[in-house]
Image (cartoon, rainbow, N blue to C red):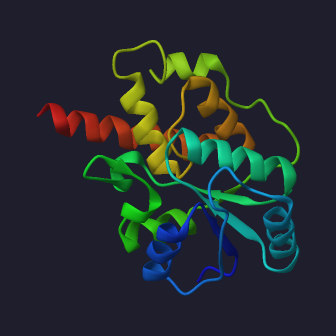
Amino acid sequence: MIKEVIVVEGRDDVDAVKKALDAEIIAVGGFGINAKVIERIREAQKRKGVIVLTDPDFAGEKIRRIISKRVNGIKHAYIAKEDGLKNGDIGVENASPEVILKALEMAKITTEEKRSFFTMQDMFYFKLTGDTTSKERRRMLGKILGIGYGNATQMISRLNNYGITKEEFVKGIEEIEKQLEAGRN
């Protein structure tokens, strides 16, 4: 059961989340996040906690950053691009209730203390950068760990800031290898 308030981009996202679960939802209305909306999110964070679930695109990431800068301690939920794609349109509103629920259940909180557990060396070693399969591997890892897709630098930041353990990381890498091997056969 999700107790937090879910923050989404727009009205269609609200409808999609309501199909997945009964929760309090705040729609920010795109980039036009005003002080009133931020204050509602802050209040929700104080009372119940907040999970931000935005579209897996540039606009969604920008909205996520705006909220993160202004409200501390929020959780982040991600859907993979392929899970939010319908007729060339990408967004939370296109994801199935099961995908939305799983993303919310896997939501991660940004840790307060900065840690540098994962480095660019890890990205190269595990072929998450510098390899022809790197983009696909990062996409797969982001989906497995529930941290979304990002370039190598964003992936390092999320791995470190969301408190992903070495065990979770290695398990994710092993899952990727299994999936890639199955795809080759």
- Locate residue 124, reporting x and y percent: 52, 16
| 50 relative to 143, above or below | below
- Residue farthest to the bottom? 22
In this image, 155 relative to 41: left or right?
A: left
Report the quarter where the N terminus lies: bottom right
Pick the residue in front: 58 or 155.
Answer: 58
Pick the residue in front: 111 or 104.
Answer: 104
Pick the residue in front: 125 or 6.
Answer: 6
Number of marks in the rendered image: 0
Residue 162 visible to the viewer: no
What residue sits 42% from the left and 64% below the top?
Answer: 93
- Residue farthest to the top? 130
- Locate residue 94, reporting x and y percent: 36, 62
What residue sits 84% from the left and 67% below the top?
Answer: 36
Report the quarter where the C terminus lies: top left
What residue sits 74% from the left and 42% below the top?
Answer: 161
Residue 91 visible to the viewer: yes
Q: Quadrant of residue 28?
A: bottom right
In this image, 17 relative to 47: left or right?
A: left
| 110 relative to 155, above or below | below
In this image, 104 relative to 98: left or right?
A: right
| 71 relative to 174, above or below | below
What residue sits 52% from the left and 45% below the top?
Answer: 148
- Locate residue 146, reporting x and y percent: 53, 53
Q: Quadrant of residue 26?
A: bottom right
- Locate residue 92, reporting x and y percent: 46, 60
Pick the residue in front: 5 or 164.
Answer: 5
